[in-house]
Each structure stands twice: as structure tokens, then as C-alpha cells.
Image (cartoon, rainbow, N blue to C red):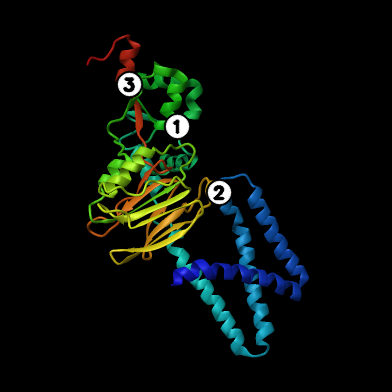
Amino acid sequence: MLGLLDDLLIVPAGLALAATGIIGLWRLSREWAVLVAGAYALATLFALTYNVGDTHVFFLPGHFMTAFSAGAAVAWLSRLWGGPRLAPRAVMIIAALFYVGWRGWSTWPAVDRHADRRGEQLIARLTLGVSERDALFVSQMNWQLENVLLYTGRHLRPDLAWTRLGDVMPHWPFLVEDNRRIGRDVVVTAQAAADIVAAYGPAYPLIEDAALPVPGLEEAAAEVPRGMPYVLSVLTPPREERLVPEALAGALDSLAGGKAPPPPAALAYELFAGVAGELPQVHRASNRPFTERFQMFDEPFTVRMDSWLPSDTFRRAGFGHVLRGRDHVMILERGVNLVWLSRNGLPAPPYYAASLFAFQPRYRLPAATLQLARSGLRPGP
């Protein structure tokens, strides 16, 4: 019931209160009304016209002005209706504080990111077993992951020899030769490998690193224990990622135990939730953000789609969230998001596909192979 009030009443009520505050400011002090309304208009206009992927961040000054206006409304209305009497003023102030408290209570589990280590975990996986003694790591990734890699190389992994492909591409052959001479492999990310092949063709024999297997979406879905609850959501993938429809259909078929689940709708937001081995209990697809609340095994789940696609290209707090009660289970990103409960009742590590945080393969230029190629020899079978 409180969730329904949050969606249908409390949010519009806050906006209406802010609009009332502008009227109250105009009645009390036109200078303050012009200042607040002008600051809100300028900040909002800037956010709407600033060509960045995280427009929501630049609405923050507008949020502050909205909160200030709502407070002004409480002050004006309590003075207007309460007069010198204390009780009406107290009731109005308590109601406003209740509204603020409820908004904080309902929002906090989703926006709490103190345990979010996905970037660090992905970079740790990509650089696993790579050190300056035996390999040079060359990256070409999304700038958010590049930032994590920069921090990792400076503070967490001083033994990691690392560079960006863009910094060395003009002299790539010389870089490879220098590392060959000291017997050091060159390890590259998937995007870096694609760029190297596009520029140099087969001149550099890149091989996929078998030490870093990448489980596919269908494999991840097959790992969900039968009889345990799962949540799978699909948000329009980033343009640099490709979602394979057949893999998604295969994953849904595996989760449903081969019982013909609803086909993907190919809309901006889509949600499947249920018990592995059975048809999904919840299926919702939309081109507009939504909040879906449901129960599995008498436990309350909430799935929040908090972004506006396709205009939002990245969000620091995620594009959506999965909550179990008040426990934050998963941050949703563009692409495929899958999480399930293990038999011990704890959430399994989230799985991402066609997403910024999806597992990536890495490729290797072994120094030994380069030595053989340079000498005109070929490795044996």
C-alpha cells in the first residue's frame, strides 16, 4: 500500500507543494520568488540542453530549488491557515517531515552504493595473473572502466604494467618488438584486439587467453538452481554492445525449464521473474520506466527502472535496481541483468551480458610465438 502511495500520490504531492511554494514566495517576497524560479529554470534548461550521457546529474540544482520551494510552501501555508495557533502549524510541519522521511526511506536502499565493487572486480578479473615481469597489459575499454584500471594500476596493483592502446597505437610494432626482446607477452582487451586486427590484419597472431573463460548468457541461466527464485531484466543495450536475441531466448527457455516462456518484447525495459524450472511469475515490458513489486516464496521483491532510455547513456547509480525487502540485490545496467538466490538464501553474484559490466575475454601475444614468427619458423602442431 505504501509503495502504491509512493508511485501515485507522494511524488506528485511533492511537486505540487513546490509549485505552491513559488506562489507563497511571490506573496511574501517577489525578489525571492524570482530568484528561486529563475535558478530552477536556468539549471533545468542547462541540464536539458547539455549534451552528455548523464543528464540526471545536472538536474541536481533543480532538485535543491524544488526542495527549497516545498519548504517555503510549508512555511507559507502554516502561516496562512494556522495563524497564531500552534497546533495547525505543528501538524503541517510534521506532515512535511513525514513526507521527507518516507522519501528517504523508500529511496535509500536503491541509491546506497557503499558495497558496489563491480568495476574493481571486473578489472581484477581482466588483469588476473598479469604482472610486469611477464606481460604488458594494453586496454581499450569504456572510459568508466579505464578510470578503474587507472586507479588499480596506481594504487592497488603497482606490479601491473599497463597502457592504453590509443597511447601506443602509432608505434605498436616497436612496442611489441621491445616486449618480445625481454621475453614479455602482450595481453590486450577485446576491443583493443579488434582495433589491432583492423589496423594490422594477421601480422600479430592474437590468441584468446584460455586462462580467462567467459561464460555465456545461456550458461549463466543454466547455473540457476531449479526451484530457486531469479530476476532477469533487459534494458536497451549500449550502442557499442550487441545483444544476441538467440542467446536471450535460450536463457529464458532454460530458466522456464523448456516450457515456452513469453518471447522478449524488444522494448526499452523488460522484466522476467519467477522460480527456475517454471514459467515466469512476472513479465512486464514497457518503453517507459516503471516500478514492479511482487512476492516470491512470501518474500517481497521490488524492481525499479530509474532511467530514461535511450537518452540516458550512463548513470553513476545504475539504470535500475532489484531489492529483496530492503536488501539491495542488484544494480541494473543497460543490457541483460540476471540475479538469483542460491540454496543458502543469499544472492548469487550478478551476471551481466551485452553490458558495461559483462565478462570480457582477453587476448595474448605470446613472446615465444612472436620469436618464432620473427625467425621465420612456425610452431609445431
* Residue under numbered circle 3: 367
Residue 35: x, y in percent?
73, 64
Q: Are marks 2 and 3 in contact (CB under 8 Å)?
A: no
Residue 92 in view, yes or no: yes
In terms of secondary structure, where does tag 2 sit?
A: loop
| Front residue of 301 and 139 | 301
State the separation of the CA atoms marked 1 and 3.
18 Å
Task: Pick whichever of labels 1 and 3 is earlier in the sequence.
Answer: 1
In the image, 176 versus 87, the foreground residue is 87
The CA distance from mark 2 to mark 3 is 42 Å
Q: Amino acid at mark 3?
A: Ala
- Residue shown at 49% from the left, 38% from the top: 239
Distance between mark 2 and mark 1 Cα atoms:
27 Å
Q: Give coordinates of residue 262: x percent, y percent.
A: 36, 49
Mark 2, Cα crowd under 10 Å, few <14 / some 14-19 / many 20+, is some
The x, y position of residue 20, in whole percent, is 67, 72
Q: Report the residue that reaches farthest toward the top.
A: 376
Q: Nearer the viewer, mark 2 or mark 3?
A: 2
Is 375 on the left-hand or right-hand side of 149? left
> Residue 54 — which label?
2
Identify the residue at horizontal 38%, vertical 22% (top origin). 179
Please state the horizontal and vertical placement of residue 335, each as a whole percent of the image. 42, 44
Residue at the image position 40 percent from the left and 46 percent from the top: 264
Q: Residues within 10 Å of mark 1 (few under 14, many from 20)?
A: some
Residue hosting label 1:
163
Specify the amino acid type for callout 2. Answer: Asp
- Circles 2 and 1, Cβ within 8 Å, touching? The answer is no
Q: Which sits in the foreground, 128 or 46? A: 46
Q: Residue furthest right?
A: 30
Checking the image for residue 139, the label placed there is none
SS assignment at label 1: strand
